[in-house]
Image (cartoon, helix red, strand yellow):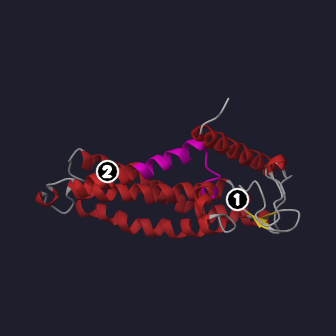
Amino acid sequence: MRIGPQGQSASYERQTHLRFQGLARRSKAGSQPQSPGASQRDPLMKAILYPFLVLAACGLALSIGAHCMALAEAVIPGGKLVWGLHIGIFVVWLPAVWVSYRLTRHSNQKDFWKVALAGCPLWMRRGLYGLFGYAALNFILFITTPGRAKQTGVAPPAEVRGFSGHWMVFYGAAFATLYSAIHAPYLFDERRCPQGHAVSPIARFCPECGHEFSNEHGNA
């Protein structure tokens, strides 16, 4: 029985998810190798990232609220204060970019989100991907819908609807990335094959020597 491309993709995603669950269990049990100073680093990392995680969650909630009110053409509470969500993006996005860089430094570009979101539950990853698609559709409808110039005020619903789609994506991506880093700090540690080559946390083969990791459940 042949499995189609979609079935193969779903199967690989499940295998990757189970591999990281195994890594997490072994890390908590103490059998996962840790770099020197990891035990001191993890609490400090969480203490630094948690405030940004909370800010990202608040920004995402406010963006969703503003978007829903804009769709209903309701008056946005606070008027022009809603545009402050532009600034909030930079506050949470800078640490999210740094975290994603550290997590994906040995990964291929095509695996960027797989690695950056490796510490997230499956529903969160799928929700973020769905948010990407919705934001793209929302932007297309925003630029192709006539009558935007007729709306006035400090926060026209059409303008808020257009921008809030981007707000949701940026805050959502920042939240998921920071969540991944906080709940899977072992992903910051370098993973190497027996030959000492640095590889991606989700790699099945070493790109340098071809060593296979699949039978080792993610351990080098």
Residue situated in front as seen by the camera: 95 or 104:
104
Which one is earlier in the sequence, the residue at label 1 or at label 2? 2
Mark 1 surroundings within 10 Å by alpha-carbon count, few (fewer than 14), some (14 through 19), many (20 or more):
many
Left or right? Give the position of 189 relative to 86. Answer: right
Determine if the magenta segment contains residue 117.
yes
Q: Residue at x 37, y 54 (%)?
A: 136
Q: Quadrant of residue 85?
A: bottom left
Name of the residue lying farthest toward the left: 150
Amino acid, disc 1: Pro
- Residue 4 at x, y = what percent? 60, 37
Q: Secondary structure at mark 2?
A: helix
- Residue 160 at x, y = what percent? 27, 57
Q: Main secondary structure of the magenta part?
A: helix
Residue situated in front as seen by the camera: 24 or 220:
220
Determine if the magenta segment contains residue 45.
no
Q: Is residue 28 visible?
A: yes
Name of the residue lying farthest toward the front: 2
Mark 1 vs mark 2, CA separation in Å: 33 Å
The residue indicated by pointer 1 is 185
Q: Secondary structure at mark 1?
A: helix
Q: Report if the CB atoms under discs 1 and 2 are less than 8 Å apart.
A: no
Name of the residue lying farthest toward the right: 194
Mark 2 surroundings within 10 Å by alpha-carbon count, few (fewer than 14), some (14 through 19), many (20 or more):
many
Q: Residue at x 49, y 50 (%)?
A: 128
Quarter of the rendering occupied by the N terminus: top right
Quarter of the rendering occupied by the C terminus: bottom right
The residue indicated by pointer 2 is 67
Left or right? Give the position of 120 relative to 16. Answer: left
The region drawn magenta spans 115-133
**Residue 193 got which mark?**
none
Residue situated in front as seen by the camera: 159 or 155:
159
- Residue 104 at x, y = what percent? 65, 64
